[in-house]
Amino acid sequence: MTESLVHKRESATVVIGALLILLGGSLLLDRLHLLHFRWTTMAWIVLATLGGYLAVDGFNRKRRWRVFWGTGLTFFSLFVVLTKLGVIERESFYTFPAILIALGFSFLALYGYQPKEYVLLLHTVFFIGVGVFSIFLWWDFFDWYDVRQGIRTYWPVAFIAWGIVLVIGRKKTA
């Protein structure tokens, strides 16, 4: 029991220490006029750090959902920070694809956590694929009419893929 409390205290100290280092370094860069950002940007940087900590801690303590949500929080927070710093254009239509891509990376981290669950790779490919596809639609890489026609024609392939996953999963557990 006491070892658990000591471990929790040590990990909390590490998180607070890392956040203070990040905060101090960011404020120093702002004071030296190397980077200029506001408190909202700083809050997202802190959230990205917290998400990274949760993901790593999830791997260490074998907590699946910490890995998932920590990874998602990290990637989405990094997206917001990059938009606030002007690295990525600030367009509202990027938000939904960024959420989907962050979810895809969360499922990829879960696959790294449990490599035997190959179904997580399907979730990864789906979410990242839909996110990237959405961005490509906005950039006019695809004609929306052709996409709709393709979906109308090939939507039964989803049932075929779903059935294959169920059959393979059934054989694996048997």
Image (cartoon, rainbow, N blue to C red):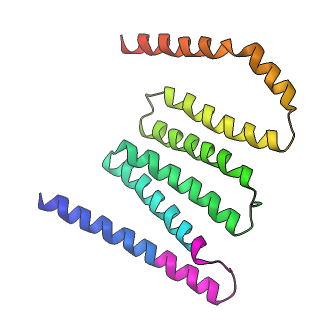
Residue 76: image location, x then y, percent = 58, 54
Q: Which residue is the extreme one toward the bottom? A: 31
Q: Give the residue drawn at x 68%, y 35%.
A: 130
- In which quadrant is the C terminus drawn? top left
Of 11 and 156, nearer the camera is 156
Of 93 and 1, nearer the camera is 93
Residue 1: image location, x then y, percent = 11, 57
Q: Give the residue drawn at x 62%, y 31%.
A: 126
Q: Tell me if 124 is positioned left or right of 50 in this view.
A: right
Q: Tell me if 102 is positioned left or right of 86 in this view.
A: left
Magenta segment? 21-41
Q: Give the residue drawn at x 58%, y 47%.
A: 102
**Main secondary structure type of the part rendered in magenta:** helix
Of 115 and 44, nearer the camera is 44
Whether residue 174 appears in magenta in the rendering, the answer is no
Residue 97: image location, x then y, percent = 67, 45
Q: Give the residue drawn at x 39%, y 75%.
A: 17
100 over 156 or under it: above or below? below
Q: Tell me if 20 is positioned left or right of 148 in this view.
A: left
Whether residue 23 appears in magenta in the rendering, the answer is yes
138 over 23 or under it: above or below? above
